[in-house]
Image: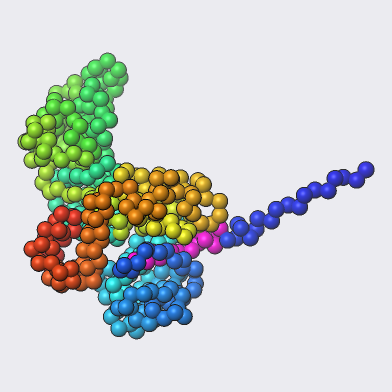
Amino acid sequence: MRAAPQAPATDTSHAERKATEASQTARVFIEEPGLAPKVVLLPRGKDMRVGRGEELEIVLADRRVSRCHVILRHERVGVLVRDAGSSNGTFLGERKLEAPATVGAGTVVRVGDSRLVISLPAEEAPRSDAAFEAMIAVDPASVQLRALVRRVAGSAVPVLVQGETGTGKELVARELHRASPRTAGPFVAVNCAALPESIAESELFGHEKGSFTGAQGRRTGVFEQAHGGTLLLDEVGELSASNQARLLRVLQERVLVRVGGDRAIPVDVRIVAATNRDLAVSAARREFREDLYFRLNGITLEVLPLRSRTGDVLPLTERFIAELGPGLRLGSGVGVALQAYRWPGNVRELRHAVAHAVALAEGAEILLEHLPTAVRGAAGSPLGDGSLRDRMDDLERQSIVAALAASDGNQSRTARILGLSRRALIYKLERYGLKPPPGTRT
C-alpha cells in the first residue's frame, strides 16, 4: 500500500532571510520642513547618497540641500557620514562636519533645513541603560531640556521634575544621574504614591529588628541605599503630611534615624523629586508643605507632554521597534498617524501602541491596521482627537519650531520669518516650552 502523498514543506528560507536582513539594517528618520516625516533603510555596506538629485538613493525636497549633499554608509558598527562637497555644509548636531565621522544611534545629522536621525539595529544598540533609557531628544523642546539637564547635572542642588504621567520624568532623573559626578554611585527610585502610610517611613528611612510586628531583621531604607548616588522621589506630592515632615527633617539635617533605632546615620544623596502635580499650587493650597517644596525646588525641569514635542514621536517609535520587534519597519501612512494622534498617555501610551502593532504584524512592516483603533483613527481626521483650539496651537507650535530650525535658533531671525515682534515670539516660546536654557545663543 502506497503512503499518502505529503504536502510539500513550506519554504520559509526567503522570508527568514529577509527578516534577518531587515534586523541588520540601520534606519534614518528624515524630517523636512513642511513635509511628513519618513523613515529610510540604510543597508549595511552600501553608500546612500542624500540630496536633491533624483538619481540619488535618498532624495530630499529641501531647497537648501545640495544636489548631492552627504553620503551615509552603514558600517560594521555605526554609520559613516561624509559630506559630498555641499554648499551649506553638513552638521552633526551643532558641530560642522569637517572630516568623515562614524556616528551612533540617536545622532542628528543636519543638512540644509532638514534633520536626519540615525537609528541602529538591535545588535548595535544593546538593551542597556545607555541605549534604551537615555533621553530621546529630536524635537527642539527636548533638545533644550536635555541641554539644561546636562548643565545642572554637575550641581548638588535638588531638582524638581514636573510633567504629566507617562512623559518620561524618570528618564530625565536617570540622565541627571548619568551626567553627574555621582554616576558611579547608585541610582535608586521610589514611587511615593505606592507607599502605604503604615510602611512609608520604613521604606524611606529603614527599620531595626523588632521595631514593629513583622520586622524580623534590620532593613535599610532607600536613603541609605542611595548613599553616594541619586535618589528619585517619584510622585512626591502623594506623601502624607506626617511623612512630608519626616522627609523635610532628613533633607535639612542630612542624617536619618531608622524606625525603632536611636542612632543618627549620615546620608549623602542627590535628591531628584518628580510629580505630575503643580507643587507650587499645592503648597499655596496647603496641600503640600511649603518649606518642603522650597527644599525640593532647587531647579525645576518641565517635561512637556508628547503632543507638544511631536518631533520625538517617530524617533521614540524607532527605539521601541528596535526593542520590541527588531527587523520591523513602518509601512505607508503609519508615521503620519502616529504624529497626528495626541497621545493623552504620552510616551507610555506610545510604547503600548508599538507593542500592540508588533504583536499583530505578520510581515516585515507595521501597517495602519496593526495600530490601536484610536491611533489609527487620528490619521483620517483633520483635527485628530483634540479640539480645534488644541490643533491650532499645535500648528502654531510646529510653525515656530520650523522657523527656529531655519534660523539656527536665532530669535531675531525667527521673529522676522514669522512676522512677529521679538517680544511676541519670546511670549510664544515660553508658552510652548521652547525657550532655550539661560546662556544659549538667541
Tell me the residue at 80%/48% (across/down).
Answer: 6
The answer to which image quadrant residue 211 occupies is: top left
Tell me the residue at 25%/32% (across/down).
Answer: 193
**Is residue 420 shown above or below 135?**
below
The residue most toward the top is 213
Q: How many marks?
A: 0
Q: Does 50 sit left or right of 160 as displayed?
A: right
Can you say which quadrant of the picture contains the C terminus? bottom left
Tell me the residue at 33%/47% (across/down).
Answer: 385
The answer, for residue 316, to whether it is visible in the render is: no
Q: Does 86 sit left or right of 180 as displayed?
A: right
**Is residue 107 shown above or below 130?**
below
Can you say which quadrant of the picture contains the N terminus? top right
Q: Is residue 27 magenta?
A: yes
Coordinates of residue 366 in the picture (x, y in percent):
49, 54
Coordinates of residue 266 in the picture (x, y in percent):
14, 36
Tell me the residue at 26%/51% (across/down).
Answer: 388
Q: Is residue 367 magenta?
A: no
Q: Does 244 sit left or right of 321 as displayed?
A: left
The answer, for residue 49, to whether it is visible in the render is: yes
Q: How is the image coloured?
A: rainbow
Report the front residue among 144 and 265. Answer: 144
The residue most toward the right is 1
Look at the image and give the residue range highlighted in magenta.
19-31
Coordinates of residue 321 in the picture (x, y in percent):
44, 53
Coordinates of residue 215 in the picture (x, y in percent):
28, 20
The answer to which image quadrant residue 62 occupies is: bottom left
Report the front residue among 248 and 224. Answer: 248
